[in-house]
Structures are given as structure tokens and as C-alpha cells.
Amino acid sequence: PLWSRGLGDVYKRQVLDQVELLETLALLSRRVAQLPPKKRRLFELKFVDDLPYPHIAAELGMNQPLARKYVQLLRAQLR
């Protein structure tokens, strides 16, 4: 029936979206692995541990605005 072809297309699109997501994650993982240790730690604190900026700043020994700026620069670098 006509409706089943539509569902097949939706399923194919979902599979393709998942493959694309996995490829993007693999690329990001390689880029993060190549970061210098301090930048990698910043990535972990913000995007893995999901810590707020006050905690990130304290952990890295800097003020909050600088921590925010470094995260902004890190995002741009990883894009």
C-alpha cells in the first residue's frame, strides 16, 4: 500500500540521520583527542561533566568571564 512506502522512507531517513550523527560524533571525538590537555579538560568540564561556569572557573583557576570566553573559543575551534 501507499502508506507503507511512506513509512519506509521515514525509517530510511531516521537511519541516515543516525549514521550522520555517529559520523559527527566520531569526528568530534578525534578533534577533542587532539586538543592540548588544558583545552581537553575545559571540554570535559563543560560538555561531559556539564558543570556550571563558577565550578569550571574555580577548577581551572580563572574568573567566570574568562571561562565563558574560553568555552566560546573552544566551540568555534571544534566546529
Image (tube, rainbow, N blue to C red):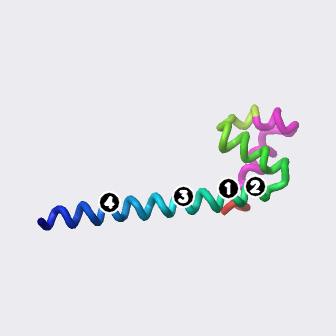
Residue drawn at (73%, 49%) of the image: 71
Q: CA distance from mark 4 to mark 3?
A: 17 Å
Q: Residues within 10 Å of mark 2 (few under 14, many from 20)?
A: few
Q: Is residue 39 magenta?
A: no
Badge 2 vs badge 1, beta-carbon distance below 8 Å: yes
Q: CA distance from mark 2 to mark 4?
A: 33 Å
Closer to the N terminus: mark 1 or mark 3?
Answer: 3
Q: Residues within 10 Å of mark 4 (few under 14, many from 20)?
A: few
Left/right of residue 14 with respect to residue 30 in the rendered view: left
Q: Is residue 61 magenta?
A: yes
Task: Say which residue label 2 marks.
Answer: 33
Residue type at tag 2? Ala
Task: Say which residue label 3 marks.
Answer: 22
Residue drawn at (29%, 66%) of the image: 9
Closer to the N terminus: mark 1 or mark 4?
Answer: 4
Closer to the N terminus: mark 2 or mark 4?
Answer: 4
Q: CA distance from mark 2 to mark 3?
A: 16 Å
Residue drawn at (72%, 37%) of the image: 53
**Image x and y of residue 49, in percent:** 67, 37
Residue type at tag 3? Leu
Q: Which mark is residue 29?
A: 1
Task: Say which residue label 4 marks.
Answer: 11
Disc 3 is placed on an element classified as helix
Left/right of residue 28 with respect to residue 19 in the rendered view: right
Q: CA distance from mark 2 to mark 1?
A: 6 Å
Q: Quadrant of residue 73?
A: bottom right
